[in-house]
Image (cartoon, rainbow, N blue to C red):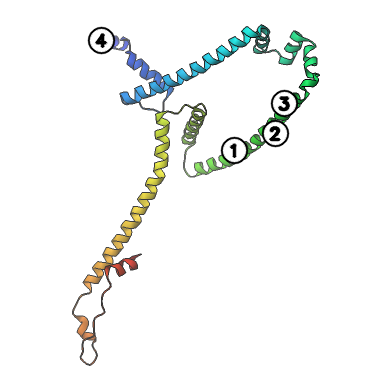
Amino acid sequence: MAETINEQEQPKSKRDLALERLRGRYPEESFDDDEAIYGRMMDDYDANEKELGELRENTDKLTTLFNENPEWAGYLTDMANGRNPVTAYIQRYGDSLRDMLDDPDKQEEYANAQKEYMAKVAKEAEYEKEYEQNLEQTLTMLDELESEGVSSEQIDKAFERIQLLAQNAIMGKISREDIELMSGALNHDKDVAAAAHEGRVAGRNEKIDMQLRKAKRGDGTAAAMGGRNGVPERRRQSNSIFDTAREAL
C-alpha cells in the first residue's frame, strides 16, 4: 500500500508535464511520437516569437510617441480608464479642438476623411447584410446535415476547427497539421473519383470476359443441322475481341 502511495506522489517528468500542456491546448492532436511533439513545440515557439516581435515593435512606437508628445500619454491613459475620448480631449485642450475644425487649410482634408468614413460605414452595412444571408444558408445546410444523421456534436467540432483554421490563416499562423488536414480533404475527392473510375473499368472488363466466354462456348457441331439442300450452312464469323468490347460498353 505504501509503495502505491509513493508511486502516486512521485513528481512528473518535464516531458510528461510538457505533454499535458500540449494535449490540453491541442486536444485534437495525438502527440504519439517525438516528431509530432517537437513539431508542435516549434510551431508554438515561432508563433510566440512573432507575437513578441510585434509587441516590441508596438511598444517602441508608443514609447517614441510619448517621448515626442508627452501630453498624449495622459490622453491615452484617460481613454484606457474608460473616459469619453471627446470629453477628455476638450478638458485637456479646450477651444483648440474648435480651432482645428475651423481651420480653412484643413477643410479639404476633413471632407476627404468624412467621405472615407461614410464609405467604410456603407461597406460594413453591406458586409453585415451579406453575413446574414450567408448565415441563413449555412443554418439551413446544417439542418440538412442533422437530418441526414450527422450529430450536432460532430457539427460543432467541425465548425470549431474551421474557425480555428480561419483565425490562424488571418494571423499567418499555419501549422503542419493544418496543411496535412486540408491536403487529406482535397485528396479524398480525388481518391473517391479514382476508385469510381477503377470500378467502372473493372465492370467493363468483367463484361468483356463474359462475352468472350459465351463466344467460345458457341463453337459446336450444330452447323450441319440447318443447311439448305444438304449443304451445311456457313457458320457466321465470330466477332473480334474489339467488337465484343464495343458491345460490352
Residue sitting nearer the eye, 180 or 49: 49
Tell me how far mark 1 sits from mark 3, CA to CA.
Answer: 32 Å
Q: Quadrant of the C terminus?
A: bottom left
Write down the residue under mark 1.
Answer: 135
- Closest to the observer, 145 or 185: 185
Please report contact status of discs 3 and 2: CB closer than 8 Å, yes or no. Answer: no
Would you identify the image quadrant in which residue 16 lies? top left
* Residue 78 image position (x, y, % from top left): 68, 10
Looking at the rendered structure, the secondary structure element under dot 1 is helix
Element under disc 4: helix
What residue type is disc 3 on? Ala
| Mark before the other along the chain sequence, 4 or 1 | 4
Q: Quick check: marks 2 and 1 in contact, CB under 8 Å?
A: no
Q: Earlier in the sequence, mark 4 or mark 3?
A: 4
Camera-near label (2 vs 4) is 2
Along the line of sight, the residue nearer the viewer: 84 or 154: 84
Residue at the spot of label 4: 3
Q: Amino acid at mark 2?
A: Ala
Q: In terms of sequence position, does the residue under pointer 1 or pointer 3 come before the other?
A: 3
Q: Which residue is mark 3?
A: 113
The span from disc 2 to disc 1 (Cα, nearest Å) is: 20 Å
**First-in-chain label (2 vs 1):** 2
Which image quadrant is residue 220 in?
Answer: bottom left
> Crowding at label 4, few (<14), some or many (≥20) Cα neighbours within 10 Å?
few
* Separation of marks 3 and 2 at Cα, in angstroms: 14 Å
**Left or right: where does residue 5 sit relative to residue 59?**
left
Closer to viewer: mark 3 or mark 2: 3
**Quadrant occupied by the N terminus:** top left
Q: Amino acid at mark 1?
A: Leu
Does the residue at mark 1 contact the one at mark 3 (Cβ under 8 Å)?
Answer: no
Q: Which residue is mark 2?
A: 122
